[in-house]
Amino acid sequence: MKPNLPGRAIQRGFSLLTGFILAIIMFGTLAFFLAGQGINAGFGSSYANTSKVSAMLASAGYISTGFDAVTLAGTTPANVTFDTTAVTGIFNPSSGGATVQNLDPTLFGRALTTDGYWIYRGSDIRLYGVGTHTTGDYTVLAAGLKLSACQQINTTLHGTLLTAAPPTLTGITDALLFGTTVTAATPTFTGLAVDLQTPALGVSGWANGCYQTATANSYVYIHTLLAQ
């Protein structure tokens, strides 16, 4: 029986076509990453910023998980500690639910000792439209962020325009950092509470969000662990 030459020819044609397409994809990808010329410069920086902010928000999620794990095990929120203390500490290897979370230092625009770390404030921030009006919410924050990082956070969380100015909270100043102690890369705030409930100053219902502070070129991300 004679072989089906036309069929083999068609099969070989498909193989060559597939190889040709793969080659185009490979060379196109290589050119995209290596050529540099002709590539939108904004794409690279925007993509990197998105990736870094996504990692930052995931880090906040890990802290929330640690907080929840300790409270679900029986520790009251007021007794939770942001350290490795057994039972109460969210970073305890056995009883805690998280590990210490460091942040990408390139997201920050000022040289502060707290840059690159979460600041654990406990229940001393009252957010407008979050929880009970007269009760502080359990929060952590990152202060001294760059404008671009702050804008990317709000775009990711709230769908705001990437070019939109972050909402200004004149009630937030560098006082957010006063009383902060840095121990084992876990800064903890021990000062006075901050009330951010005045409607004209905030965005209602933002349990998590990034804000412009009263300090020039200073942006802060506030993440709520427990609204109460």
Image (cartoon, rainbow, N blue to C red):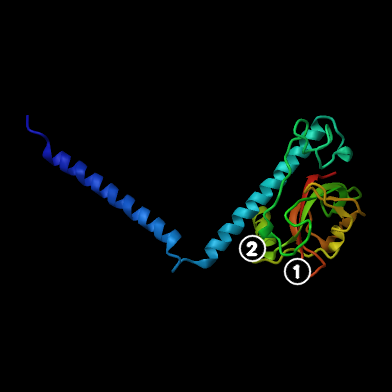
Inspect the image, locate mark 1, and give the three-letter code of the amino acid beneath it. Asn
Give the foreground label among 2 and 1: 1
Quadrant containing the N terminus is: top left
Q: What x and y, as percent, mark residue 143?
A: 77, 58
Taking depth in this image into account, of 111 and 46 the one nearest to the observer is: 111
Residue toward you, 89 or 5: 89
Residue 117 location, x and y as percent? Answer: 75, 52
Which numbered dot is residue 82? none
* Residue on which disc 2 sits: 161
Circle 1: element type: loop
Identify the residue shown where x is 84% and y is 65%: 170
Q: Position of residue 144 (x, y in %)?
A: 76, 61
Question: Could you tell me residue 157's position as x and y percent?
Answer: 67, 53
Q: Quadrant of residue 155?
A: bottom right
Which label was assigned to residue 217?
1
Outermost residue toward the left in this view: 1
Whether residue 63 sits left or right of residue 81 in the image: it is: left
Q: Which of 47 and 127 is in front in this view?
A: 47
Which residue is more in the foreground, 61 or 94? 94
User: Which amino acid type is marked by label 2?
Assistant: Leu
In this rendering, position of residue 107 left or right of residue 224: left
